[in-house]
Amino acid sequence: MAKNVGIIAMDIYFPPTFVQQEALEAHDGVSKGKYTIGLGQDCLAFCTEVEDVISMSLTVVTSLLEKYKIDPKQIGRLEVGSETVIDKSKSIKTFLMQIFEKCGNTDIEGVDSTNACYGGTAALFNCVNWVESSSWDGRYGIVVCTDSAVYAEGPARPTGGAAAIAMLIGPDAPIAFESKFRGSHMSHAYDFYKPNLASEYPVVDGKLSQTCYLMALDTCYKYFCHKYEKLESKQFSLSDADYFVFHSPYNKLVQKSFARLVFNDFVRNASSVDDIAKEKLAPFSTLTGDESYQSRDLEKASQQVSKPLYDAKVQPTTLIPKQVGNMYTASLYAAFASLLHNKNSELAGKRVILFSYGSGLTATMFSLRLHEGQHPFSLSNIATVMNVAGKLKARHEFAPEKFVETMHLMEHRYGAKDFVTSKDSSLLSPGTYYLTEVDSKYRRFYAKKDGNCTGNENGSVVNGH
Amino acid sequence: MAKNVGIIAMDIYFPPTFVQQEALEAHDGVSKGKYTIGLGQDCLAFCTEVEDVISMSLTVVTSLLEKYKIDPKQIGRLEVGSETVIDKSKSIKTFLMQIFEKCGNTDIEGVDSTNACYGGTAALFNCVNWVESSSWDGRYGIVVCTDSAVYAEGPARPTGGAAAIAMLIGPDAPIAFESKFRGSHMSHAYDFYKPNLASEYPVVDGKLSQTCYLMALDTCYKYFCHKYEKLESKQFSLSDADYFVFHSPYNKLVQKSFARLVFNDFVRNASSVDDIAKEKLAPFSTLTGDESYQSRDLEKASQQVSKPLYDAKVQPTTLIPKQVGNMYTASLYAAFASLLHNKNSELAGKRVILFSYGSGLTATMFSLRLHEGQHPFSLSNIATVMNVAGKLKARHEFAPEKFVETMHLMEHRYGAKDFVTSKDSSLLSPGTYYLTEVDSKYRRFYAKKDGNCTGNENGSVVNGH
């Protein structure tokens, strides 16, 4: 069986168009700090009418192959996690096949995985399992997470965002899975869902979703610790991992989540909790589970107690989610990308625990072990290729009015046919794919900023008709 | 690594309500034989207003667990293939978690896989890979294929159908994967897709879809033979497998597909084609690929030549698809279930080749090796449990007018909220789940025919609120 299977390369793309949360607060007439401190968010990236989840994934997969010099024929599996539905039957993966077909490679397994923000994690697990299975043919896999998170006007709107991430999967990875350490919690819930098929916007019960998230976190941590302890014959505590990466709908929930894990360690009497912390958390030791999710005092005390550990083990993972917003399936991996960006030179040998959550609900806590790796598949080169600081710096700020106007246009365009876009790629970087047209049969056409069209030189039909 | 991983048990469910294709021909005013001979179909099963892909999958998973006496705690993975979207974010898998939550098992990996009729195959491959991977925890997996195929009035409507299939996955299986023999072809096409999000009906280019299907078949067979020949150091021909199972949108396409494989063997000069057949196919040996897909004469000649082999290697797989119609993701596995039903006592040691196709497009040809197995996981017991003949016999025929009326109601209900159904379960067998209500927040409620409600004794809220 292949060893140390995991992520051997990564790239990230997010739209170059964003709005400041501070400007959005003023525009929405809410109290100052509601989005920046209350949610913990700095900026929100969004797709304009020329970008969508398909264009973003075409961009990031092309970039991954080019920057790591991977021959498209070396790919044996390609799968996508997304909850942004453009077509209810045709997978996003089939759009990406355009990149590989022109190189003569159509023997590529995998489709799209779906459950809210968890689909990317499901795809990642599937791809890693493929490499470890008897059906592996020695080639690389690619996992793509791509989403555009948009909300109806109202309190959820500032929790939007958009991005696509591509991960190359194979053996001897610098980012290797510790697959035996894993705990999942899956359950039937209506915290966030998309039953209104004609609308891009979800139905959200924000308060319920936060409770579901924290309950899933507790249960996953319980299973995770149980499996660790069974295999390693010693107690697991937060001290046994160097970094914790969370699915990040907004930063405040990440702060609460880590505090919740500290409270878990306190209840479990684990070594990570010192005497001062124990004293501060003692008044809450008799709360029932339900009470503990509702207690503001516990939330406050545990966040205060966990602050030093949060700064060391979580804060380095928060950059991109705070700057880009919720990226649904890409959100967890954008947080992980932030860690590679901030700490790449110090990560060899470190253990990183990730918590993936998708409403509805599906959640898993899992463990990665990092190694420096060999160029081009080294942690430092991955950080260089992703160029997070450069991409953030090259963005274009939109005024809130312009953002709202774009949302209106996108509402109108969602599920529509027979229109052409502005084809305005002036704000996009070279190499970026963009939407040019949706024809009368709903067929979608994309072009690439450098002038080449996907799969067809003359920029017209690209779908085999 | 676990050995002989594959399908260790199966069950199938299809709605007890159906219409005769012959009656539909008369009702639609088309020429006699257009659906029965032209499409090769006998009957079409459909969901009435009390059934949907969620209720069917609740029914079949519950039945699988009960009939093979599997403790729900023994399940470590559960995944669904479907292209019937009821919610764009919340997976069908999370609805099925209701069955497991009440037994205290929420640590179950897997979500939904999507690409047209191929999602079930993707889920099956993922589940088999999981058992072979280092993340396997020793428990069983379950793969569910569930779909309701409905079309707008017109020529595609008679190609509808509905069913759900559940497969138990584990090592030492009576239906084991030969994972090294596999060929996939994936490509960007618009042959059948669902871009009109508010409608349940697809956009279909029937002629293009048939050509895409046959081209994918050719390419998969080419890759399959190539891999077989590389590993076994001898040529593969149709003689090397005992049965061929095809994704079956309608039986006529299955006949054409097998004839196409015979033509492939002729072109490859493989041993399966005798001298008489060679003579009959010789006039077509100079056709280009494109010409060969369009040639009616080739179609006729190759179907004639392949008839004896078809009767032996394919006909036993056609019962359920002809009687139920297209079941999308469940279609291929319903064809395989037909084989188990018809030939279970003669299947030990046999090799079965399956061809899975999903528009858009994704396709794979793969190989299974059958063993008698040990009770309850034996081929004969699987056939007994599935009880195909009994289920077909217990159905209720609807007049075409009643079928059309049901389709109208379902159109109206698709994506709707705030309604109660008739709750009429009189036509359903005991143990069948059915839809009772969709509330003002789009939350769906189901009951079970024997009087027990999913996850809640009093038949009301089942979603944790």
Image (spheres, coloured by chain):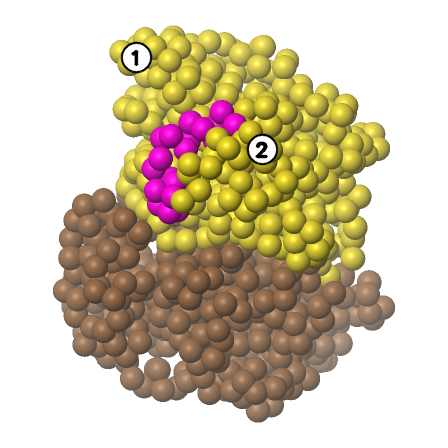
Chain colours: A brown, B yellow
Give left or right: position of A239 versus B92.
right
Would you say residue B103 is visible in this rendering? no
Between residue B324 and residue A424, name the one nearer to us.
B324
- Residue placed at 30% from the left, 44% from the top? B195
For the residue pair A386 and B239, the one nearer the viewer reads as B239
As helix, strand or loop, the secondary structure at mark 2 comes to: helix
Q: Are marks 2 and 1 in contact (CB under 8 Å)?
A: no
The location of residue A132, given as percent across then percent down, is 68, 62
Question: Which labelled disc corresponds to residue B275?
Answer: 2
> Which residue is rendered at x = 42% and y = 38% of the image?
B284
Q: Please say if B379 is above or below B97.
A: above
Residue B20 found in image quarter: top left
Q: Position of residue A19 (x, y in %)?
A: 26, 73
Determine which residue is flagged by label 1: B31
Viewer can see residue B390: yes
Q: Residues within 10 Å of mark 2 (few under 14, many from 20)?
A: few
Q: Is residue B285 magenta?
A: no
Q: CA distance from mark 2 to mark 1?
A: 38 Å
Q: Is the residue A149 above or below the residue B296 in the image? A: below
Label 1 environment density (alpha carbons within 10 Å; few <14, some 14–19, many ≥20): few
Q: Main secondary structure of the magenta part?
A: helix
Q: Is residue B99 left or right of residue B324?
A: right
Residue A317 screen position, x and y as percent: 51, 78
Chain under numbered label 2: B
Amino acid, disc 1:
Ser
Magenta region: B287-305
